[in-house]
Amino acid sequence: MHHATFVSVRVPERGFFVTPHLDPMGKLSKEKRDVYYRKAKEEGWRARSAFKLLQINEQFDIFSSVTKVVDLCAAPGSWSQVLSRSLPHDSAQIVAVDLQPMAPLDGVIQIQGDITKSSTVTEILGHFGGVKADLVVSDGAPDVTGMHDLDEYVQHQLIVAALNITTLLIKEGGTFVAKIFRGRDAALMIAQLRIFFEDVVIAKPRSSRNSSLEGFVVCRGYRSPPDFTPSLDNVFEVMQYSSEELLAGANRELVPFVLCGDLSGFDADMGYDLAADAHVQAPTAPPTDPPYKFAKKLQETQALGRPEGMSGSKE
């Protein structure tokens, strides 16, 4: 038997009790205590990351007057959901791109494609009738290794890939939002992005855990540099830039850092336990083609882990 002592807390403005909850192992499950994970299920979002885009928009109003949007690295589709719910379907066009398949979303055109391929650019612009996008967003991230320098480098390259295709898709004055890992080279990334955008800041939504290095670059006012020809090549290999004034010396410029979301709202690092009468809800959209699908089929036939040729049925 598991023994534990907890204190129940009433949170009237949020309409539920904070009460004890034990998982089968006798420990509190961090996932079940994550209030944004639970709210995402309650409100029908595909992932808790939906709240990050909502809070970025609350701070920067990036959805204002937007009629054409591209969501890069979109799976499982929570940011596309936010765009679909926030923009009018009769006037806005939303295109979501990812290598992985996604369950259909109302009002969202889906492309299963590679953001480094010219065919993807052609297909996106074809849906827009050749008109450039007002807004390009990307919540893509690599599988983290725990080695921060490596993770930051790979994420940096993903931002570069997203920016490459963005220069072919975005109109003058457009906005670009992408995930970034806040490390020692974040200032260098900002210096590079300022070649193409008038205003660049790093935003930290309230729904993003303080313990995470995750942040989001919010780049507004796209301006194509003189003599620059957009392509899918690395934009920083063909563009000349200097980061000396930004990175060193007495005149070093600090990278703007903005917290987004209601500071009196939920804390992503705190554990809010389920109410005694709460029930666990299923995910809004189960994985369309999970890598464990074959193993799950073997498990159902009791063949998982058995030597080849051995029957899964019991005598």
Image (cartoon, rainbow, N blue to C red):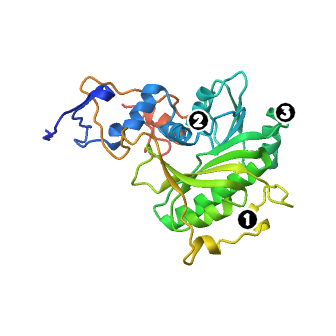
Q: Amino acid at mark 2?
A: Gly
Disc 3 crowd rating (10 Å Cα; few below 14, some 14-19, many 20+) is few
Mark 2, other Cα within 10 Å: few <14 / some 14–19 / many ≥20: many
Q: Label 1 to label 3, Cα distance in Å? A: 29 Å
| Side (left or right) of 111 relative to 296 | right
Q: Residues within 10 Å of mark 1 (few under 14, many from 20)?
A: few
Side (left or right) of 73 relative to 283: right
Circle nearer the viewer, 3 or 2? 3
Residue 207 position in % (x across, y down): 44, 42
Residue 142 visible in rendering: no
192 and 37: which is toward the camera: 192
**Do the residues under discs 3 and 2 have CB atoms within 8 angstroms?**
no
Mark sitting on residue 236: 1
Q: Earlier in the sequence, mark 3 or mark 2?
A: 2
Query: Residue 138: in sight, yes or no?
Result: yes
The image shows residue 273, relative to residue 117, as above or below, that is: above
Residue at the spot 43% in from the left edge and 54% down from the top edge: 212
Q: Nearer the viewer, residue 201 or 213?
A: 201
The type of residue carrying mark 3 is: Gly
Q: Which mark is residue 77?
A: 2
Which residue corresponds to the image point at 41% horizontal and 49% vertical from the top-left?
209
Picture quadrant of residue 186: bottom right
- The answer to whether the residues at label 1 and label 3 have Cβ atoms under 8 Å apart is no
Query: Element type at marker 2?
Result: loop
What secondary structure is found at the residue carrying circle 1? helix
| Real-space Cα separation, disc 2 to disc 1, in angstroms | 29 Å
Amino acid type, label 1: Phe
